Amino acid sequence: MTQPLPQQRRSSLFRDDEPVLQGRALLPDASGPVFGDLEVWDFTTSLKRPANVHVSGWKVCFSSELEDPYWNLLAREFFMALSNPHHPAVLRRGVVLGTPADPQTLIQLASRLRTLARWGHKNGLAPQSGSWTADDLRQRIRDLAADGTAKATVAGHVTALKTLAMVEPALSLPWPAGDPWPGQSARAVVDLTATAEISTPVVPPEAWFPLIRAAWAYIHTFAPDILRADQRLRELRTVAEPSVKGADSRLRAWLADPRNNVPVHAASVEGQAPRVNWHLMTLLLGYEGHRDTMLTNKPSRTSTGRRALIENAVATGRFTPHALTGELVQVTRQDGSTGPWHPGIGPRALIELKTALRDAAFSLVVGLSMMRDSEIHEILRESVVEHYSTPAIASTEIKGTADRPGEHWWIADPVAEALAVAEAVSSHPDRVFAPVHITGPDGTIDGVKMLESFVAIVNAGCRWSGLDEIPPAYIRPHMFRRTMAMLTDQFPGSEIATGIQLKHLATRALANASTRGYAASDKNWARYLQTALDSAKFRKIKDLYQRHTAGEEIGFGGGADRVKDAFDKITATVKARNGDARTADSLLHSARIHVRFGALNHCTADHANPVGAVCLDNAVVPEGHVGPLHERCRPDRCGNSMITSDHLPFYNSHGRRQLEIINNPRIPTVRRELAERELDTTNRVLAMAKGAHP
């Protein structure tokens, strides 16, 4: 029970037995903390915890400086008001707050109160804050800034003090009255200016490429071997007998079958004397947990005889490191040799490899889906669904939401395959990403550690797997979302997908500062992106040229007419020079044919050399301008787009999908309006393809 303190101005607004969580959705059979708990407020059994938050991150500890009765009561009253902003007693005091604070917010505030009390003691202030002034609090912030604390962190401390000032009327203990910075936001106090530039770095390309390739290799190529070994091991353990009766006859029968090879440890295969894996050998004979009586190394007549029979078989060459799997997938290694991708999967190696599969799946999902780390951890079994006729992940949006709404992230086939593999190795009853070998509902894993673990496993096995080594680099889950936003922005037509994946559905084509910042290019990627774009563009143009010279119809629209004219000039030049395919390739490389193939957004015409591009007749091109006119050069307004026959099925399907959205009254109005605009553009493109230029 809380004892009254001499410094209290009045009795506390809250009873000791009053629940901290009031008017909120709680877990079944919830037993949450009460105001009178002096040491810990444990929310783990009462409030839904995000999947990527450890149990310790759901407990508020009143430790260190908060053990002092004064600061303890002050913190509990502060947190109680924040947890229950609509509490009648709080409202009667004129305190108006926002949404209820979550446990992690309270943990952060507890830390700031501890450091505040510590600062006061260090600087000779009174042990209790009742005699402190607003000048003292402002000095606290100046000291933080002088110590080199990051501006964003200092702003957080300012917010905590401003919030305490708001709650002060509801406190029974004295606190400096009034906002120390009236009329100023926390950002303004510390001069933290907003900028469109995103501070999140991209994943370095030298690490991104080998990491994504390795993850796909594990998911698509190596996973069948690993899952087969896991299935075989479970089968052996299921049928293993509790008694070793008849073991000698069973061993002789097993050795009599020439198809059976003695399992050996993979690490010993390259040595002079392969070492028998006695544990696995016991399982293959149909026994579990009986190594001491079956094949013990202790001197006994029965065990010595059995071991001798097995070791004699090994001496004749009857051994294998692949007893659980059979032959593994063959790969070409860095030295040019060909062989299995792993030296041998035994029970111990299987533990590491199943974890590697989970981490590889996480790497692919975080790398290619644009989901946040917290949202990936919330993915449940059977979460791959169809969303507007397109494969998507159904999960829970965490950031910036209090009610944890369900969301959908459209995905590609490799991501769906990765989730299927992760689900196969997960031991959690509900979640896909969880500890592989720990059952139970509370298993929590760290996305950073999964990435680090996967990189370590890949690099340790490069000699066998043939995968490229992943160089050391600073890699965090949130960096992949930024990287993919940048990559999609560099390729034609992908801005729409970027906007949708980043949840900015009300606008398209990167129309706000936050999304533009996310998609901003990175100098470390410039060389890779330009090479990839140039190669993809030339392959497309070369294919169209070959089809055009063979007499096929390659496309429709004003852009197509100009490309055909450029192709005819190249063909004439090749004939005039008595050239061959190499001459045509050289001319195609130098022609600089600028055209967007079936894009739904602005073109990328180079107005300095607009071969194959045309702008609006009334478009005024600024002097010296090159590149697109973002608000005026669009395929639905001019004939720049080249629509090939390959694109027509896509546009027809796209139009049908937009009609489904428009005609569905359950879909939000803003999404239906976006679909109407997309449908109008699609219809214009199709009309262009039929020769009816809008």
Image: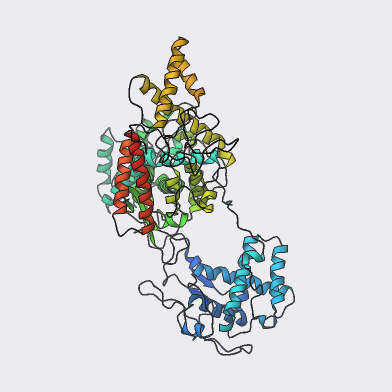
Relative to 398, is 47 above or below? Answer: below
Residue found at the very far top of the displayed protein: 578
How far across and down, in percent of the image, does residue 613 sit?
A: 47, 31
Query: Where, by quadrant of the figure, is residue 76 drawn?
Result: bottom right
Relative to 197, is 624 above or below? Answer: above
Relative to 660, is 74 above or below? Answer: below
Residue found at the very far front of the displayed protein: 618
379 and 202: which is toward the camera: 202
Numbered circles on residues, count: 0
Which quarter shows the C terminus?
top left
Does residue 360 appear left or right of residue 156 in this picture?
left
For image coordinates 26% across by 35% down, the residue present is 256
329 and 604: which is toward the camera: 604
Relative to 336, is 107 above or below? Answer: below
How far across and down, in percent of the image, does residue 693 sit?
A: 36, 36
Residue 165 in view of the camera: yes
How far across and down, in percent of the image, does residue 274 sit?
A: 42, 35
Q: Which colouring convention does the figure follow?
A: rainbow
Query: Where, by quadrant of the figure, is residue 692 drawn?
Result: top left
For image coordinates 37% across by 22% down, the residue present is 548
How far across and down, in percent of the image, does residue 588 sit?
A: 47, 22
247 and 134: which is toward the camera: 134
Residue 292 in view of the camera: no
560 and 272: which is toward the camera: 560
For image coordinates 60% across by 71% down, the residue present is 160
